Image: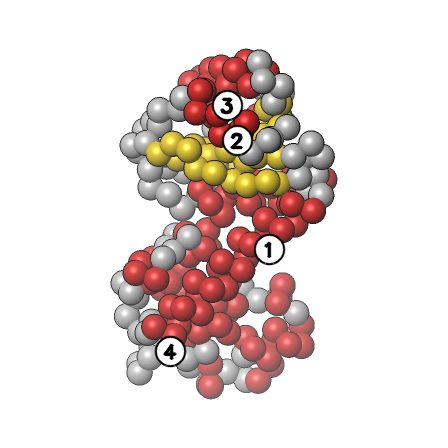
Amino acid sequence: MSIKDLPLSLRPRERLLSCGAQSLASEELLAVLLRTGLPGRGVLDLASALLQEFKGLAGLLAARPQDLKRIKGLGPAKRAEIVAVMELARRAAAQELGQAPVFDSPTQLKHYAALHLAHLEHESFSVIYLDTRHRLIELQTLFRGTLSQASVYPREVVKEALARNAAALVLAHNHPSGVAEPSRADEYLTQTLKSALQLVDVRVLDHLVVGQGQVVSFAERGLL
């Protein structure tokens, strides 16, 4: 059904303005951004296809303009709008984490890590550097691996932390399988990095394992 065929009270844009953005499903919010569909394909159907193609909002957030070309009906203007909005979302999350200690909003920190890692099809290891007040300095992806593992070198982590004058950091990596449960190898790596960073007075505050729809915290599990 086309949006024009819906009663005014059920149309996404009108509901957003009257009831708030939180009242809309993800595909409806995306439809508001896209505005129009294609001949024979409504904008809601187009929005649903986008979310399905990129495996949800996390994947769409990380999509590049060339990735969006795979979706029929997304011209240069629509691709540019989507990429711009998604980049604004990432910057907003980073700004919030840069203004207050990250553990004032642990859910936001998990969300931030998921925005960068949940969509990846290969294992990727990132470090979230923090200042003396535990505010965000930067997220850096240090190592990329295969579907099953990534080689992480403690010397590189120490070097990059010192280069940013970080007082603490949070480790983060994804499991391409989608299952966020930490492995024994993850636990061993965490302790190895923690010991190496202690030598230069940099604290490891947490290690986040990102899966599909879930982020597991080592700190919350008592594994640090």
Residue at 46%, 34% (x, y): give it: 126
Q: Which of the two residues, 184 or 25, is positioned nearer the viewer here?
A: 184
According to the image, label 2 marks what residue? 163
**Which residue does the numbered mark 1 point to in the structure image?**
92
Q: Amino acid at mark 4?
A: Gly
Pointer 4 local density, CA inside 10 Å: few below 14, some 14–19, many at least 20: some
In contact (CB < 8 Å): disc 2 and disc 4: no
**Foreground of the two, 71 or 95:** 95
Residue 22 position, x and y percent, is: 63, 63
Q: Quadrant of the C terminus?
A: top right
- Which residue position holds label 3? 158
Lateral position of residue 221 relative to residue 121, left or right: right
Residue 107 in picture, x, y percent from top left: 63, 42
Q: Is residue 151 depicted above or below 131 in this figure?
A: above
- Name which of mark 1 and mark 3 comes first in the sequence: 1
Mark 2 or mark 3, earlier in chain: 3
Describe the element under mark 1 as helix, strand or loop: helix
Label 1 sits on what residue type? Answer: Ala
The local crowd at label 3, few if under 14, some if 14 to 19, many if 20 or more residues have their Cα within 10 Å, is some
Q: Nearer the viewer, mark 1 or mark 2?
A: 2
